Image (spheres, rainbow, N blue to C red):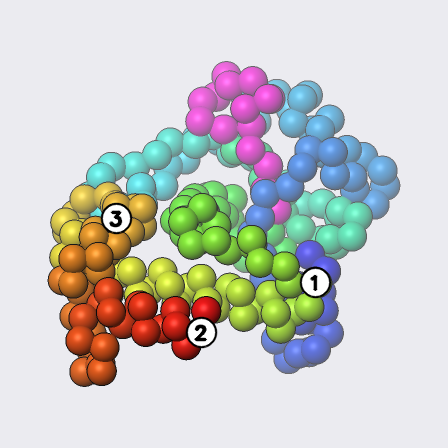
Amino acid sequence: MKRVKDRDKAAGERRWGFVFAIARTWQTVDEKMIKNLVTHLPCNLYQRTWIPKAIEGSGRKTFWIYGKRWCLCHVGDVTVVLSKKGRHVGPKNSKIWVTNLPALTPRQGVSIYQKRWAIELVNWELKSGLGLGQHQGSGDEKRSMNAVGIAVLAYLFLLRAGHHEITPGQSWRIFQLQPTLQLRAMTNQFPFTRPNRCGDNASCLRHLSRHHG
């Protein structure tokens, strides 16, 4: 939230919009908790809507939603939207998200928020498979950007080198490509884009270890 506000100040001609989930413990400027709205809102005030699933042609998802304009502490004027997958689903299973885009309807907001899942999967693969976040950035923004850049480059390299392992129309994970790439490198099946003086992959690795070890 702080970064969004900083960007707003730095570029006055551009207004940064957001759609994100928020904790039910968040308060309004008049000290009302969102938790009270979620707990006590009657079921008949929710409206039924649906959105297409992420994959085209795979059907749609049904949600029950409720939207309300509120002014939240440290956030400002936003639309608070409650969403759940069934009309009589309890408050514990309700999702809460906010947006500062006044023209965005609750249904459009739910659709945008659902698309975050693909981003969450990429973040998970970058962290679990490629070590994003394991290097100490000491709070320095440039170092943090470099760490993200290195992880993304490694991700793209794996996609480029192992694209033949991906079947169109089927789900896949970066973890499926890593063992194949390692095997190809160990058995000298991974071609270099430029001729090297080492002869093969194994001798090239030995050459690098002697000079940089």
Answer yes or no: is residue 154 visible: yes
Please identify, in this view, whether the residue under mark 2 or under mark 3 is nearer the observer.
2
Q: In this picture, is 207 found above or below 144?
A: below
Q: Are marks 3 and 1 in contact (CB under 8 Å)?
A: no
Q: Is 59 part of what is drawn in magenta?
A: no
Q: In this picture, is 45 found above or below 181?
A: above
Q: Are marks 2 and 1 in contact (CB under 8 Å)?
A: no
Q: Report which residue position mark 1 lands on.
A: 138
Point out the residue furthest to the right here.
Answer: 30
Q: Residues within 10 Å of mark 3 (few under 14, many from 20)?
A: few
Q: Position of residue 127 (x, y in %)?
A: 48, 50
Please state if 84 lies on the left or on the right of 165 as rendered.
right
Element type at mark 1: loop
Q: Quadrant of residue 41?
A: top right
Q: Report which residue position mark 2 lands on.
A: 212
Which residue is rendered at x = 52% and y = 33% of the image?
Answer: 83
